[in-house]
Image: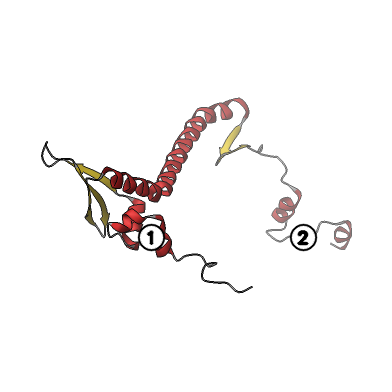
Amino acid sequence: MESTPNDRPLPEAAYAAHQFPALYGLGCGEQELAALCRQGFLSREQRTPEQAPIYKLRYRMGGRQRTRYVGSNLVFVEQVRNELAVLQAAAKRAHKLQQLLRQARRALRRAKSKVAPLLVAESGYHYHGHAIRRKRPAGAPQDGVAKEVAKSNGFLIMNTEESKENY
C-alpha cells in the first residue's frame, strides 16, 4: 500500500502550528516554542486604573528576555495560557519527578543512618551500598572457586579427582 501525504505524520513545525494556533498567531516559531517548553509566563500589566489590563508573554531565549504582546482580550489570553500549559506540562512533570526522587533519596539516607549502628551492634551486619551484608568471620572458608584461585597464586586449577591424581 502506498502512503499518501495524509498518511504521513506532520512535520514538527506543522504539528505545532495546528496544536498551538494562538502562539503561532503571536509570531512564535519553532525556536520560540522550544524556549516556551522550558519556561515562559503571561504577565499582567495595568497601565491606568481606568483601562483594562494588558497581557504579555515573557520568556527567555539565547540568554535574553523576549516579550510578545498578547493584548487585553481575555478569551485570547486564556487560549494562550492553555497552550502554554500544554507546552510546559512535560517539563513540569519532569521537575516534579526530580523533587520526588530527591525526597526519596533523603528518606533513604535518614533511614540508613538510623539503622546502620543497630546492624553493626546487634548482629555484625553492615551496609554495602543499599544492600545489608554480614561480615565474614576471620577464618571462614571462601567459596570453592575463590579458594582454589587463592591457593594457586591467581591461576584457576580444575579441582577434580582426575586432576588431583595427576598432580
Q: Give the numbered dot on residue 157.
A: 2
Q: Which residue is mark 1?
A: 17
Please report the residue visible at 35 percent of the width from the left and 62 percent of the height from the top: 30
- Left or right? Give the position of 50 relative to 133: left
Mark 1 Cα shell of 10 Å, populated few (<14), some (14-19), many (≥20): some
The colour scheme is: secondary structure
Which residue occupies the foreground of this view, 57 or 128? 57
Question: Depth check: 116 or 150 in front?
Answer: 116
Give the answer, above or below, for where 164 lies relative to 142. below
Element type at mark 1: helix
Q: Nearer the viewer, residue 52 or 131?
A: 52
> In 3D space, how far apart are the residues under numbered discs 1 and 2 (Cα atoms)?
70 Å
Residue lying furthest bottom? 2
**In percent of the image, x 51 and y 30: which residue is there?**
111
Is residue 143 found left or right of 124 in the rendered image? Answer: right
- Which quadrant of the figure has residue 49? top left
Tell me the kind of residue under disc 2.
Answer: Ile
Q: Is residue 69 above or below residue 137?
A: below
Q: Residue at x 37, y 55 (%)?
A: 20
Q: Secondary structure at mark 2?
A: loop
Badge number at residue 145: none
Disc number lying in front (1 or 2): 1
Q: In the picture shown, does residue 163 fall above or below 5?
A: above
Dot 1 amino acid type: Ala
